[in-house]
Image: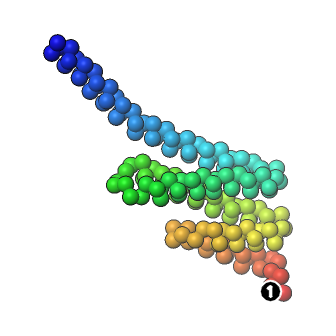
Amino acid sequence: MAIRSRTSVLWQGLLLLALCLSLPHCSHDIHEKRTDVIKGHVESFYEHLKHDRVAAAVRENEAIEQLSTQLGEMVTRRVNQPGSNQIDREWTDLRTANETAAQNWLALGQYLSIKKHYAQSRATYQRVIDTYTGASERTYREQAARAIRDLDMLSPSPAAR
């Protein structure tokens, strides 16, 4: 009876060890899936611009922003948990989604400027300034502000006329 009990405990221990070792792998898979989703949206975004489908490109970038919003809510809910590797990965995914979306808006603004859609380009850059207000997103706001000043050289804004 004691042998059977020890064997049962041993198997339970091995099962628990296998479960513990597989959980970080599952978490990593989720992280990879999020990264793949972002990459897919980015590829679609540029493919749409390549074929002059601006509205479709905007939808792809909005999907990235939606993912960012969801990740932000997850990180906020877990902020009170002590040092979790999961939170770190979600924070990394959140930053990646935010930075990717901001870069895409800047690329869209440049695309619209090249196509001489100056008002739309200006509005796109203004969106970056208004939306990405965090300290880590300052670079994107500065790029957008410079782009608006450059647009004013090409086509003065209606307010400046």
| Residue with the mark numbered 1 | 160
Quick one: quadrant of the C terminus? bottom right
**Residue farthest front in this picture:** 1
Vertical position of residue 125 compared to residue 36: above or below = below
Place of residue 1 in the rendered image (x, y in percent of width and height, measured from the top left) = 17, 12
Q: How is the image coloured?
A: rainbow
Asked if one can make out residue 139 in the rendered structure from this viewpoint, the answer is no
Q: Is residue 156 rendered to the left or right of residue 42?
A: right
Residue 10 falls in image quadrant: top left
Residue 18 image position (x, y, % from top left): 34, 28
Q: Is residue 40 above or below residue 160?
A: above
Direction from residue 126 to residue 1 in the image, left or right: left
Type of amino acid at the residue the image marks with label 1: Ala
User: Residue 34 versus residue 12: which sits nearer the camera?
Assistant: 12
Q: Is residue 135 visible?
A: yes
Q: Quadrant of residue 23?
A: top left
